[in-house]
Image: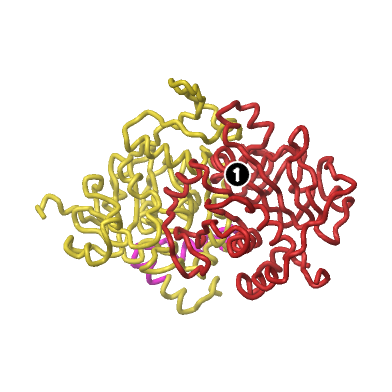
Amino acid sequence: MAAQVSRAEYCVVACAEAWRGDGEILAAPMGVVPRIGARLAGLTFEPGLLLTDGEAMLVGDDPEVVEGWLPYRRHLALVAGGKRHVMMGASQLDRHGNQNISCVGDWKRPRRQLLGVRGAPVNTLNNPTSYWVPRHSRRVFVERVDMVCGVGHDRAAAAGPSATRFHELRRVVTDLAVLDFATPDRTLRVHSLHPGVTAGQVREATGFPLTVADDVPRTREPSAAELRLIREVIDPEGLREREVPS
Amino acid sequence: MSPGLDKRMSAAEAVGRIESGMTVGIGGWGSRRKPMALVRALLRTDVTDLTVVSFGGPDVGLLTAAGKIRKLVTAFATLDSIPLEPHFRAARERGALELVELDEAMVMWGLTAAVHRLPFLPVRAGLGSDVMTVNPGLRTVRSPYEDGEELVAVPALRLDVALVHLNRADAAGNGQYLGPDPYFDDLFCEAAGHAYLSCERVVDTTEFAAAGGPGTLLVSRHSVAGVIEAPHGAHFTSCVPDYGRDEAFQSAYAKAAADPGAWREFAARFLSGDEDAYRAAVAEFGREGRWPLR
């Protein structure tokens, strides 16, 4: 089985695992693989999850069936209430979990304008946050981000108790590994390596020193039932393989 | 309806009430239900030096390209199916746009504060992020209660004028949206000194009930100064269920925006005439389905 599982499919399972134990909250995936992962979690081990159609409707197991309404104003209110676990993208991410999606270079006149801060500041201070990085590289994993949009542990601590009160960074899923912040100083470390990836490869693709335990586990295998769901039910078009080419 | 409540007017008349230096709020979200006919009408004026508040899409792009914006207040500028608004991006990379970059929730609460005539509202957003760094004027406020929490005091985003586009409206300025999301169009209208509501179709008030339930009646006439019937007035952004986004046209827009020469050609073809000329040029584009013409 393992030989037939694509890297994208390991990523889907690793993303799905991010929502394990979350219960009846909104899973807010950004990106193709996180979206497939969230649906997989909802269809298997986390049936309470709420999911949107990508716009204002909450949909059930069958994405054609509307079960609720979540326009932007209610979505933003839900963020502040904390009943949501978002998985955002990151153009830059540092070891403390500070994320940038706004611009690269000097903010006053950026070398490259990106999306803008969007909802990253409110997300990170109010509901659990994970990140998805489809191409693990030194361009993304940098020593220091150019504009802090999503707030990392060091910046939240410096900003005081109102910033840390509901601040919770969960995990970072990349095409090479799953990272978390389970270190004494809450900086990134490798939680698991995807099968076929070496610790050296991940270190090489990361722009800061990264803790990798000698006995670091492998990202778990999808079950046969999960693979069937991914391939036949959730993503029969194979969009996952375009986001993470094998 | 009393004749005094008939607020129908042309797009030119509506934007004629906008003066240089004003703060203009624009409804919709990204490339969704933007009041594009009103924005195009604004492009035809000599108004400049505007402060624009918007959940940014091609409204921001067009006004930026035309040099109308002095200061932009936003959390993003996107075309949705194309992640980056090309004119916004180019202007930022030239250092040509004064930006007040706020979090999405901060924009919502800033508009809400203006609607409620409050100087600010406290929010748990911005703390620890560089939103505080790039907006050194932002202040925090301490809760007077036992918790003593220190939160960001988002200042009211008061608007001189708001421009929004809905599916239906009556002549008095009651507006009905029929799509999936109201966005924040009611807040924009109520936060403004004058709001101008364009719509796909002006209908008799009696027609609202058959089109949708009470929740669809988003904008109320007390907050509207002018009603503009503008069929396809959100083009090329989406105005569901009347029409979706014109992806082919948006893609042509984005391609042209990436190159000054191509943009001049695009502007000459689509933006040099009035709204009828725009619609004719778009119809021709639809028949040919390609860009640029050679």
Q: Which chain letter matches label 1?
A: A
Point 31% across, 64% down: residue = B200
Question: Percent position (x, y) of residue B16?
Answer: 29, 48
Q: Which residue is mark 1?
A: A128
| Chain A representation colour | red
User: Is B217 above or below relative to B211?
Assistant: above
| Label 1 packing within 10 angstroms: few (<14), some (14-19), many (20+) | many
Q: Position of residue B191 (x, y in %)?
A: 33, 40
Residue occupying image coordinates x 60% and y 26%: A160
Closer to the camera, B102 or A112?
Answer: B102
Residue sitting at 37 percent across and 62 percent down? B179
Q: Is A192 in the magenta?
A: no
Q: Which chain is yellow?
A: B
Q: In the drawing, does residue B211 fall left or right of residue A150?
A: left
Q: Give residue A33's quadrant in the image.
A: bottom right
Q: Nearer the viewer, residue B77 or A111?
A: B77
Colouring scheme, one of rainbow, by chain, secondary structure, one colour: by chain
Stretch in magenta:
B256-281
Image quarter of the C terminus of chain A: bottom right
| Secondary structure, magenta segment, majority class | helix
Q: Amino acid at mark 1?
A: Pro
Query: For residue B265: magenta?
Result: yes
